[in-house]
Amino acid sequence: MKSSLFLETPKNFDYKRTVWSHGWYQLLPFEFDKESWTLGTVINCPSPVFIKINEAENGLKIEIEENVGIEGETKIMNDVCHIFRLDDDLSKFYRLTNKEKHLAWVAKQNAGRMLRSATVFEDLVKTICTTNCNWAMTKIMVTNLVNKLGEVTLDGKKTFPTAEAMAKMPVEFYKAEIRAGYRAEYFKELAEKIVEDNLDVENWLTTDLPTKQLKKEMKKVKGVGNYAAENLLKLLGRYDGLALDSFLRGEFYKKYNQGNSCEDKQIESHYEKFGEWRGLVMWLDMTEKWL
């Protein structure tokens, strides 16, 4: 039996800016219908269930495809709050961007919340899937992971795989079936460390470790270098790093260097004054025209 929930959002929240904050909405188990601006995804509560999310007055409307009970509804509400960053306090960030004429649009459009997955593990695996390849290949790898290892909902949708499911598969499976290339060994080792060695990547969300030290911990995971760590840190609410990749470098060259390449130090210097928010400032500066 279908049901719906209402989740109140902060006054400085913008649904469309959050959904389209970066490319995650294009990756399973997210499903996006641009015509209705509906974002679907699969939540474990504890059995997997497909939900649809859309804008409502002063909040979000969540449609559930089946009866999940009170505990299931609570889990869905908490996960959607996490996914949309509803608890993020961006007031300091908006005061900072309002001081810059070319960034005044940020607070006016309530931009700044970056869509994330329901778990840190999912965001970590997806981030590894973005390294050293184009976006089309990233989508292929994530789609294969979900379709081949995800749990099935009653209506045939699939979850992102658990670490347990990934740990059971051999390296060759990730090469042949997921098309992960050199990442195959990374996926296998990461999943095994979580299952067998009690690596708790979910703890990265709430740890008191300084960002510099947390970044070092992240880089102990094979496949996580500076870019991947800094990208994942942004999804944890830490924006010290720029997470420079070919896209950001290219956009910066066009906007600030007449299309000519430059050293990363020049880019870092440009955003240095924004301190702990510099990574988020750069991302929004480079993606302003997406909406």
Image (tube, rainbow, N blue to C red):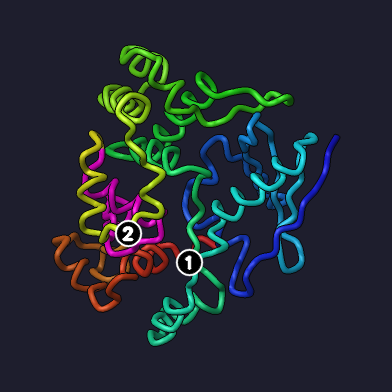
Q: CA distance from mark 2 to mark 1?
A: 23 Å
Query: In what element is the residue under mark 1?
Result: loop
* Residue 7: quadrant of the picture: bottom right
Q: Which mark is residue 54?
A: none
| In-front residue for pair 86/24 | 86
Amino acid identity at mark 2: Asp
In the image, farthest residue toward the right: 1
The answer to the question of whether label 2 and label 1 lie on touching residues, with beta carbons closer than 8 A, is: no
Magenta stretch encompasses residue 242: yes
> Would residue 189 appear left or right of 78 to someone viewing this image?
left
> Would residue 170 appear left or right of 69 to someone viewing this image?
left
Residue at 28% in and 64% down: 240
What x and y, as percent, mark residue 16?
61, 60
Residue at 26% in and 45% down: 218
Q: Is residue 271 above or below residue 19?
A: below
Quarter of the picture holding the C terminus: bottom right
What x and y, as percent, mark residue 173?
37, 13
Amino acid identity at mark 1: Gly
Quarter of the picture holding the N terminus: top right
What x and y, as percent, mark residue 38?
69, 49
**Residue at image mark 1:** 112
Magenta-highlighted residues: 224-250
What x and y, as percent, mark residue 255?
32, 68
> Would residue 48 appear left or right of 142 to someone viewing this image?
right
**Residue at image mark 2:** 208
- Count residues near mark 1 (Cα–Cα under 10 Å), then give few for <14, some for 14-19, many for 20+: many
Residue at 50% in and 57% down: 21
* Residue 12: quadrant of the picture: bottom right
Residue at 63% in and 74% down: 11
Magenta stretch encompasses residue 118: no
